[in-house]
Amino acid sequence: MAANALTQRLHLKVLHTSGYADETLARTYAGRFTNPLLKKPYSMQQLA
C-alpha cells in the first residue's frame, strides 16, 4: 500500500509499525522496508 501511495505522492512520509519480535522481523521482512520502522509499543513522543 505504501509503495503504491508513494508513486502518486512522491513526498509522502511513510512510517511502518510492527508488534513482531526482532527475530521475526529480521527473518521475514529483511530489506523490505526502506522507510522507518517503529516497534510497538510506542509513545506519542516517538511519533513526533
Image (cartoon, rainbow, N blue to C red):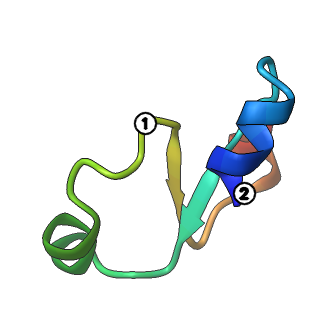
Residue kind at label 2, given as amino acid type: Ser
Give the secondary structure at mark 2.
loop
**Residue 13: x and y, percent?**
76, 31
Contact between marks 1 and 2 (CB within 8 A): the answer is no
Residue kind at label 1, given as amino acid type: Thr
* Residue pictured at 56% horizontal, 71% vertical: 40
Label 1 Cα crowd, 10 Å radius (few <14 / some 14-19 / many 20+) = few
Decide if residue 39 is on the left or right side of residue 30.
right
* Residue pictured at 72% horizontal, 57% vertical: 43
Decide if residue 37 is on the left or right side of residue 4.
left
**Sequence-earlier tag: 1 or 2:** 1
Instruction: Report the label total.
Output: 2
**Residue 32: x and y, percent?**
34, 52
**Residue 12: x and y, percent?**
81, 28
The residue beneath circle 2 is 43
Label 2 Cα crowd, 10 Å radius (few <14 / some 14-19 / many 20+) = few
Q: Nearer the viewer, residue 6 or 14?
A: 6
* Residue pictured at 18% horizontal, 65% vertical: 26
**Residue 28: x and y, percent?**
23, 75
Q: Is residue 47 above or below residue 38?
A: above
Q: Quadrant of the C terminus?
A: top right
Depth check, mark 1 against mark 2: the one in front is: 1
The residue beneath circle 1 is 34
Q: Nearer the viewer, residue 46 or 4?
A: 4
Q: Nearer the viewer, residue 6 or 48?
A: 6
Label drawn at residue 16 = none
